[in-house]
Image: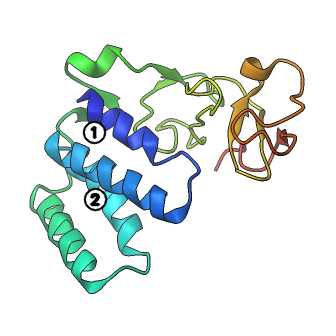
Amino acid sequence: GINAEYGGLLTQIPLQTKHRTLTFKMAINKNMDANNYGVSAKYLQVLLSRNISEKERDILDNKLTKCHEYDSTDSSIQSSSSQPTGPSSTQIKYTCPWCKVDTYPLNITCHNCSGKILFCHKTFELIQKVPAYRCSFCDSLFSSESVGKPPEKCFFCNFTTPEIDNHSCQKT
């Protein structure tokens, strides 16, 4: 559902490690509730690759086992095109800034060209055109459309001057 989709977007916000871990756990739980076991498995693998306690590892391993029991299928996503199905399918639309194909922003990359899906920290919307500006202090990303002229200060931390980001805005 839509909560699972937004939960996935939360994982892309640059945060301190402990807070990012929390967004991954939220995304895992929302996607598990929506029977999106493939998406949940991806997020679980990220968390399991980190230095975590044995108790936490056991909990995450159990969830990953459940994902594998369901063959890591996603009930709200068509596996052939990575497009959403159900009532939430029209609520999030995204045109890849690289190949201009409509795609589904639950994944980190476009299903068509593998370009990175980018999130603006000023408008809280998906970035439709590249390049973008990135803050070197807090790592926030801003669409060039949302800022107009080059910003004097970061809209998120108000600490440094964001610069055109040609590295992380490149296709993978």
Q: Across the whole image, how many numbered discs are drawn on residues?
A: 2
136 sits to left or right of 13: right
- Which marked residue is nearer to the observer: mark 2 or mark 1? 2
The structure residue drawn at horizontal position 42% and vertical position 61%, both measured from the top left corner, is 21
Q: Residues within 10 Å of mark 1 (few under 14, many from 20)?
A: few
The structure residue drawn at horizontal position 21% and vertical position 33%, both measured from the top left corner, is 76
Q: Nearer the viewer, residue 96 or 56?
A: 56
Residue 109 sits above or below residue 18 on the image:
above
Task: From the top left corner, tell me how far across and down residue 135 is, in percent.
Answer: 78, 45
Q: Is residue 52 visible?
A: yes
Q: Amino acid at mark 2?
A: Ala
Q: Nearer the viewer, residue 48 or 152?
A: 152
> Which residue is identified by label 1?
79
Q: Nearer the viewer, residue 6 or 159?
A: 159
**Mark 2 or mark 1: whose residue is earlier in sequence:** 2
Task: From the top left corner, tell me how far across and down residue 78 is, in percent.
Answer: 26, 33
- Disc 2/disc 1 C-alpha distance (Å): 15 Å
Q: Residues within 10 Å of mark 2 (few under 14, many from 20)?
A: many
Quadrant where the N terminus is found in the figure: top left
Q: Amino acid at mark 1?
A: Ser
60 sits to left or right of 124: left
Location of residue 62 (image quadrant): bottom left
Q: Is residue 107 visible?
A: no
> Which residue is identified by label 2?
41
The structure residue drawn at horizontal position 20% and vertical position 78%, both measured from the top left corner, is 58
Task: From the top left corner, tell me how far across and down residue 138 is, in percent.
Answer: 70, 50
Location of residue 72 (image quadrant): bottom left
The secondary structure type at the circle numbered 2 is: helix
Image disc number at residue 40: none
The secondary structure type at the circle numbered 1 is: loop
